[in-house]
Amino acid sequence: MARFVMEFERPLVELEDKLDELKALDVASLPELAAEIEDLEREVERLRETLYAALSPWERVQVSRHPARPKTDDYVAELFTDVVELRGDRAYGDDEAVFTALATLGARRVVVIGHRKGRTTKENVRRNFGSPHPEGFRKARRAMRLAEKFSLPVVTFLDTAGAYPGLEDEERGQAWAIAECLATLSDLPVPVVVVGIGEGGSGGALAIGFGDRLIMLENAYYSVISPEMCAMILYKDTARAAESASALALTADDLMRLGIADEVVPEPLGGAHRDPAPVIVAVGERITSALEALSAEDTGALLENRYGRLRAIGVFAEGDG
Amino acid sequence: MARFVMEFERPLVELEDKLDELKALDVASLPELAAEIEDLEREVERLRETLYAALSPWERVQVSRHPARPKTDDYVAELFTDVVELRGDRAYGDDEAVFTALATLGARRVVVIGHRKGRTTKENVRRNFGSPHPEGFRKARRAMRLAEKFSLPVVTFLDTAGAYPGLEDEERGQAWAIAECLATLSDLPVPVVVVGIGEGGSGGALAIGFGDRLIMLENAYYSVISPEMCAMILYKDTARAAESASALALTADDLMRLGIADEVVPEPLGGAHRDPAPVIVAVGERITSALEALSAEDTGALLENRYGRLRAIGVFAEGDG
Amino acid sequence: MPINDWFKQRESRRYTVTSGSGADLPDGVWRTCPECRKTLYQGDVARSLSVCPHCAHHFELIAADRIEALVDPGSFEETNASVGSVDPLRFSAVKPYTESLAAARESCGLAEAAITGRARIGDRAVAIGALDFRFVGASMGSAVGEKVTRLFELAIAERRAVVLVVASGGARMQEGMLSLMQMAKTAAAAERLARAGLPYVSVLVNPTYGGVTASFAVLADMIFAEPGALVGFAGPRLVEQTIRRSLPKGFQSAESLVDHGMIDGVVPRAEMRGRVAAVLGYLVPGGDV
Amino acid sequence: MPINDWFKQRESRRYTVTSGSGADLPDGVWRTCPECRKTLYQGDVARSLSVCPHCAHHFELIAADRIEALVDPGSFEETNASVGSVDPLRFSAVKPYTESLAAARESCGLAEAAITGRARIGDRAVAIGALDFRFVGASMGSAVGEKVTRLFELAIAERRAVVLVVASGGARMQEGMLSLMQMAKTAAAAERLARAGLPYVSVLVNPTYGGVTASFAVLADMIFAEPGALVGFAGPRLVEQTIRRSLPKGFQSAESLVDHGMIDGVVPRAEMRGRVAAVLGYLVPGGDV
Ligand SMILES: [Zn+2]
Ligand SMILES: [Zn+2]
């Protein structure tokens, strides 16, 4: 895959390219070059820090969509052992945009459910670029029910632009499939830990996107609507997505502030794709300690707390009228 | 609809037609005719009795398929009030080959589930001639779950040649849909009364075809395989269906003998279509008394008895080897 | 206007549950039916539950009329009338969210897009709610989510059936993730009602979309829709852009939803009260009829 | 021959659970692979779990070998070995049913098409069964239904997981309605196992059809199939006659069943033991790994 450059990184990438060019020259024969290279290196370093240190919401959305960003597959491969995939909704199809499996995290057996983007174009076509069809949500629900039956905690990974808005998806009850996931997840009598690793697009993310803990990666987003579609509705102009991204309060920090997320996993400067390994390890540690804490609760308390978490979300006024 | 003549009735129908012709003549002007008519009437009566008094299994199968035979629609219209139809499996479609509804029988609120053949060709096309697709069984299962949730007894009417053996039916999991009905019905914690009113074709009938009581109409059949297909397999000749029908032990009497059916509702000479009203009334009475008896049982006993009924079916040897 | 100001101002002009419809239209006005293009006398429209006498087109109804059309006369008693949205995200694009709210309150005489309360249908105690499409497209923000959740909780506490008349543009994006999470919150409340063994009937009217369809709206034991109502997850324009061809006739219509197995029936407005009452007759706990 | 005679005769030649396959073929025989047409040495075939070393075609295996291939060596202990079919309907067409039974017993050395018993897989206690297609097409009559039901009941009583290797032509029509009702009986037993919170894994092998597919075979928590196995309700010829056009390639194959969401995976024979053991590791009650 060709190197993927996000819009806002372009100035930095241009400097980096120039630096690489200079370095390729014969420094020994051009003594003045060494100083120039040194200057440029400082400049690149400075720019990198200012550029990445405080990403705007829209820039984070772009980072969350970076093709090299670690995906559900990567977390599963790195963190879990003895993975046995569950396939199919037992009624219509096996949607590869949703991954479901029995898997082991350290010494703990769990059910994993995750949106599944591909790495290659071929994979992405099979997986519909991570946008589930109704049968994907129905497969997820089957995995939830299996977790319930055999008392296995559930770990979910969110990474979808949203449920697929296709013709046949509507006909096969996309809304019904999502709603049934919400209802099932809301009182599933096992611990549910959710990790926002990339995109958290609307109802398609929410269907497997709430539980007893919500861990967000620093550059993951979670939003009621995509910034582009929001801009389209508000301004009839998708180019104003950046404004929408800021308005929608969709970053990990926003979710912390709103009391929806529980913790944020920091990413290396520039995004998790620049050095995935420590991020994946950190996510594994966060999941493990969340499961540890939640497993100590009895089921009744667990479900009361989960309902209480949802119940508390919302800001409204209650007048005296 | 043109008058439908079953193969074995043909001699009788021919005599009846001749009698009608004679009666249409001017009897007053032909004095010898009166005696001839009287003779013929006796002959017709005698033939009717010998023909219908002891129908062979294959003849009963034909009666069970008679287009004018009372259907699920007729029982529902005559016996039940305040009918509210349930439609759809909430996932793929609404299969009109299966009827599901909330309905009231006398003073009792129940869930009705029935195979639904049509009366007209148009109706039959919409209803696939009473042969369900997987979504029909999934709708039936939804109705069963509703009955469970709201503690409503279930009354089912069997009248299908079988589950539809189509390409897409296989692809959408015909076997899975039937198996899930069987599992659900087997421990549904409400009384289940089954009435065989016409055809009872194999797994497609069984999916809604067992419970706490099995009431069979005298000429209804219930079979592991259709006589024609059995003949095809055994003799490579569907014309030998009569032999197969006898071998398969598929009549109401056979089912009584095998301990599968609980009671048989007699039909008028020639079949229920010759005088439907009293048959329908009798069926209503049988259902009512069955529900009355079953409602007195507590749920645990009900389910134990249902399992015990199934558990007892089967004849095998247990050697000393 | 801020919600507290609005409540003060509201004192003087409490909205009332009015019968008939055409919202604020006086009786003497003439309207054109969008379906058959006939000119109709508003008085006639109102007297027929806002259904066109010529082609049976179902006009939009305000939430209060929705409830009025379903419950036993005079039995409705509103709850949580004072719960209304605020602007937690200070959302401002084109027009500030606070302005949209103020305008909605002004024109509808409602604090929020949902009206909820206790009532009786066929003399059975229910918890009933309706959404008002005039109010920011009946989108679900924190206040709608809260009111719907409280309605389910009231029903559980008082062992009532729930009846909801739903129309909605979906989630209320001006409240961002607070809005999205109302889907989970209301679905969780609906699930608790189900676990309590209590019945829930939803009535989907034109239009019902997005996060409302994909949460409490379709979690009912039985779902009915009005003729011609459009119901879906993604809006038709988005679907059309996605598949890059035109949509089949009747796409997302109530009638096609029946064929696709998603709802229990298309019920004309005039018959809806009877249908809902009949269902409650079966599902509300209690002795035989 | 009547079953009691058969049992007497059987004393002298009890069948044994043999490893490898090719049923009764001696090692030195050459076979032709039906898939790649290569000529194979039976000894090689047997040593590779009866999978063609060239094209991975999975040859049929007898039930005893199915069990042997899944369980911990030497752990299988048969139950209900003496349960066998009789001829309750005195079914006679072309050939009397009793003759078919006698011939099957003679050639397979089995009392019935199902073998069931206790075993261990990855040292976990299971109740395991397998169907033998050579025995009247592994069709389910009263005896198979009884053995499968008893297996589920044994698992419930002893808190074991159930593993079933299924191949079948469907219901056994020679037992008429007694056979059809075994579908309900085995499904009811499987449901009781599920309610008891115990796991059930089924392995579908070529071919699995009719009343067996539509009952216990697909009620498992996880379902796997061997490569190329054909699994369905209606047989392909009947489907072809029904739709009056030819069937698509791969119709009813294990691989297409995965795409249609019906099973959890196609697993080569050599990996099946590991896959089943892995699943049991998750679903069998007990502490963490
Ligand atoms: Zn009109
Ligand atoms: Zn080969």
Image: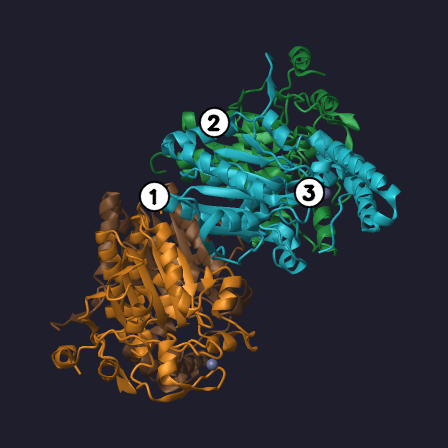
Chain colours: A cyan, B brown, C green, D orange
Q: Where does label 3 land, which residue?
A: C57
Measuring from the top left, give residue D244's x and y in whole percent.
55, 77
Q: Name the residue carrying label 2.
A: A308
Q: Say what amino acid the circle numbered 2 marks.
A: Gly
Q: Return the residue at label 1.
A: B108
- Which one is in front, B189 or B269? B189
Of tags 2 and 1, the one toward the viewer is 2
**Which chain does the numbered disc 2 sit on?**
A
Tell whether circle 3 marks a residue whose Cβ is less than 8 angstroms from ligand 1. yes
Given residues C1 and A292, the one toward you in this image is A292
Crowdedness of circle 1 by 10 Å Cα count: few (<14), some, many (20+)? some
C266 or D177, which is in the foreground? D177
Residue B157 shows up from this direction: no
Q: Please, what secondary structure does the residue beneath circle 3 have?
A: loop
Say yes or no: labels 2 and 3 on the same chain: no
How many neighbours does mark 3 have within 10 angstroms: few (below 14), some (14-19), or many (20 or more)? some
The N terminus of chain D lies in quadrant: bottom left
Count of numbered badges drawn on the protein: 3
Q: Is residue B54 left or right of residue C113?
A: left
